[in-house]
Image (spheres, coloured by chain):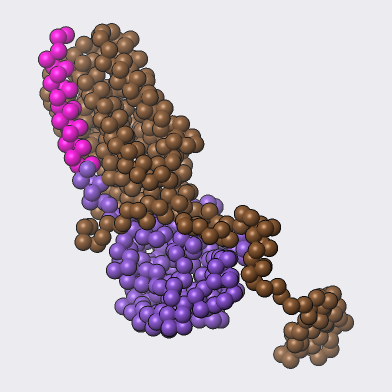
């Protein structure tokens, strides 16, 4: 059993209550109060101190079933708690682990800030805090789940754009929601990371999304892949090359031996 | 509690809010109704609105219907957090590893007259391993926790494997270096530790390549980087040894080793660049910016160094020239691909286009 999020971006109103609730509950520091000038988005990306991030996309294109000629997409992004997590598999200290709730969790008393998880995440979620030196990301409110509560962002979401629960149950609900939207004419609705078949690179996401445009529009990679999938191949080429270099070293030694002194 | 402060309204529940019209916003705070001058104005049609906005802000990123969208051009990945000393570590660690490998091969098959170069390689290996450890520890976010690296033995993490390899390598190399100066009974062990260090030198030089392949960085996703890491280490170790005083036999050994490494490095680097060129955005760091300059310089220096090495003549000066150019080439190469990775991670289109054009390895192929 694994718990996760279903983020239905079609009902997101961009209120950022999830960002605020997350910051408050987890007592995260501020991001520096920058004004980016990019729509209503002033945090711009997930990071060490931003575990929920609402993206705002203004499009001069209407959604199917609407005649406005304009659409405003909002989506609350979060750590995906991948079924196969790049950060977890890359972590050399064992600081990143999978919890009993199926979430991916960084043990802050173990993390030594090597930064390898940062490069291992195909979504650019986890980041190292410059001042703190350790890697941080969404914990799926591990402490709240321990007490039987839902994560702060899901609790605070006024439109139920963020839904928390058992992943299988959420997937069922999400599929029905996509069908409903298709019936209403919003033909472009689809699930991002809903299962391993649609996203073989990660084996599916525990925090998946309902989107109505290309993933790139929301700053999500179209076909993410956990980097460990290339491990065998690269160790193999390294092994072959190592045999070659070992042979070269022996040949060099022999060539030197037979050289005239 | 029941008394209102001047200018504030008392609302049920005890809270006090500013009274309407006091702040000039023309909002009835109890009903939320707007009563300002323009409140009754009809909003412009959204189609016109879009047209107007596009005229005023022709470059609002999300307003440009584009075949390959990005989110305001912001990076999708986090760039590697490592600082430049890690690129230096790629070089130093590689030199240490491949020196030990050449040293143990020479120790086993080179004969008595090449004893002096064996000692030299051991010193290079030990010094290199110590410097490497220092660099790696200082680059951690929490350097005081460096021992956590040996907390688990994790096959899925090249960094965990690398930590174990470097620890074992340092110990073996140090033992091989120091034991000959110790009590007579231990002296014979030096050869055994030398051979162990030589064997461990191979994965030490190669794993940094595997480590960068196992990231989400577009330009680093080629398994050949591990081959390049090994070849570059071979060339670098050979080039460094070429700078030292050597006898004729040693010189021959080092020159053969170094030249083969350089040729391997050129071939692999070209293969990687050619593979990246399939997607223009992925290949960009090889041609643009500081990483591009370093990459192209590294290739030119490699070829020059190989040409010097192949040129006729056996003088030590020629050997030293080849060594100097070869060392510069190796250092350039390491910094080039380190910086290329950072640049590549910052470019969202590199990630998007790579994933659109080359499907992920599916679960069955793992």
Q: Residue at x 84, y 89 (%)?
A: B3
Residue B32 occupies quadrant? bottom right
> What is the x, y in percent for residue B174?
27, 33
In what quadrant of the picture does the N terminus of chain B appear? bottom right
Q: In the rendered image, which quarter is residue B192 located in?
A: top left
Q: Residue at x 79, y 88 (%)?
A: B10
Q: Which residues are magenta?
A: A238-261
Image position of A69 with respect to B263: above or below:
below
Q: Give the prevailing secondary structure in the magenta stretch.
A: helix
Q: B291 or B48: nearer the eye?
A: B48
The answer to if A256 sits in the magenta stretch is yes
Check the image and report above or below for B136 versus B112.
Answer: below
x then y, percent, for residue A255: 14, 19
Q: Residue B196: x percent and y percent?
A: 18, 36
Tell me: B234 left or right of B148: left
The one nearer the camera, A238 or B358, is B358
Q: Which chain is purple?
A: A
Magenta span contains residue A247:
yes
The percent position of residue A190, horizontal first and vertical second, equals: 41, 73
Choose between B144 and B267: the one closer to the eye: B267
Residue A173 lies, with reference to residue A116, above or below; the image says: below
Q: Is residue A127 visible?
A: no
From the image, which quarter does the C terminus of chain B lie in? bottom left
Identified at 33% across, 14% down, the residue is B320
Horizontal side of B225 relative to B183 (left or right) equals right
Q: Colour of chain B?
A: brown
Q: Is residue B365 visible?
A: yes
């Amino acid at each position: 059993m694994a718990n996760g999020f279903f983020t239905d971006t079609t009902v997101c109103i961009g209120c950022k209550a999830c960002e605020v609730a997350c910051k408050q509950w987890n007592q995260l520091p501020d991001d520096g109060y920058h004004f980016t000038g990019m729509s209503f988005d002033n945090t711009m990306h997930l990071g060490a101190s931003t575990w929920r991030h609402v993206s705002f996309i203004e499009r001069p294109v209407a959604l199917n079933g609407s005649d406005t000629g304009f659409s405003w997409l909002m989506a609350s992004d979060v750590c995906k708690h991948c079924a196969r997590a790049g950060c977890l598999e890359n972590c050399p200290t064992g600081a990143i682990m999978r919890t009993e709730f199926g979430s991916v969790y960084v043990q802050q008393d173990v993390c030594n800030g090597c930064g390898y998880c940062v490069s291992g995440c195909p979504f650019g979620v986890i980041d190292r805090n410059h001042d703190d030196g350790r890697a941080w990301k969404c914990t799926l409110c591990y402490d709240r789940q321990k007490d039987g509560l839902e994560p702060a962002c899901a609790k605070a979401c006024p439109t139920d754009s963020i839904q928390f629960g058992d992943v299988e149950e959420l997937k069922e609900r999400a599929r029905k929601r996509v069908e409903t939207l298709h019936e209403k004419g919003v033909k472009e609705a689809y699930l991002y990371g809903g299962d391993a078949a649609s996203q073989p690179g990660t084996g599916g996401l525990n925090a998946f999304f309902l989107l109505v445009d290309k993933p790139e529009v929301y700053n999500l990679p179209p076909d993410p892949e956990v980097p460990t999938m290339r491990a065998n191949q690269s160790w193999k080429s390294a092994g072959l090359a190592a045999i070659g270099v070992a042979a070269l070293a022996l040949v060099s030694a022999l060539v030197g031996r037979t050289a005239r002194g | 509690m029941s008394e209102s402060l001047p200018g504030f309204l008392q609302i049920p529940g005890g809270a006090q809010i500013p009274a309407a019209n006091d702040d000039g916003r023309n909002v009835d705070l109890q009903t939320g109704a707007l009563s300002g001058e323009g409140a009754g104005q009809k909003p412009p049609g959204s189609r016109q609105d879009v047209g107007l906005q596009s005229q005023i802000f022709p470059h609002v990123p999300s307003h440009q219907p584009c075949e390959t969208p990005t989110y305001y051009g912001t990076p999708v990945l986090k760039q590697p957090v490592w600082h430049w000393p890690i690129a230096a570590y790629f070089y130093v660690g590689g030199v240490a590893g491949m020196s030990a490998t050449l040293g143990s091969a020479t120790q086993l098959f080179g004969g008595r007259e090449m004893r002096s170069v064996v000692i030299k390689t051991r010193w290079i290996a030990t010094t290199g391993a110590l410097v490497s450890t220092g660099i790696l520890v200082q680059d951690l976010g929490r350097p005081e926790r460096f021992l956590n690296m040996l907390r688990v033995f994790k096959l899925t993490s090249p960094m965990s494997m690398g930590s174990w390899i470097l620890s074992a390598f340092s110990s073996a190399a140090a033992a091989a270096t120091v034991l000959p100066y110790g009590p007579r009974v231990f002296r014979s062990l030096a050869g055994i530790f030398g051979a162990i260090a030589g064997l461990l030198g191979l994965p030490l030089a190669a794993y940094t390549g595997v480590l960068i392949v196992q990231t989400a960085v577009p330009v680093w996703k080629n398994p050949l980087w591990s081959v390049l890491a090994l070849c570059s280490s071979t060339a670098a170790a050979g080039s460094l040894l070429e700078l030292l005083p050597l006898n004729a036999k040693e010189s021959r050994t080092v020159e053969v080793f170094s030249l083969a490494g350089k040729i391997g490095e050129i071939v692999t680097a070209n293969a990687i660049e050619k593979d990246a060129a399939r997607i223009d955005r992925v290949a960009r760091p090889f041609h643009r910016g500081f990483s591009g300059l370093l990459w192209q310089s590294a290739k030119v220096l490699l070829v020059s160094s190989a040409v010097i090495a192949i040129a006729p003549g056996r003088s030590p000066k020629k050997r030293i020239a080849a060594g100097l150019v070869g060392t510069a080439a190796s250092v350039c190469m390491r910094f080039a691909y380190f910086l290329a990775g950072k640049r590549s991670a910052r470019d969202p289109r590199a990630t998007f286009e790579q994933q659109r054009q080359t499907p992920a390895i599916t679960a069955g192929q793992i």
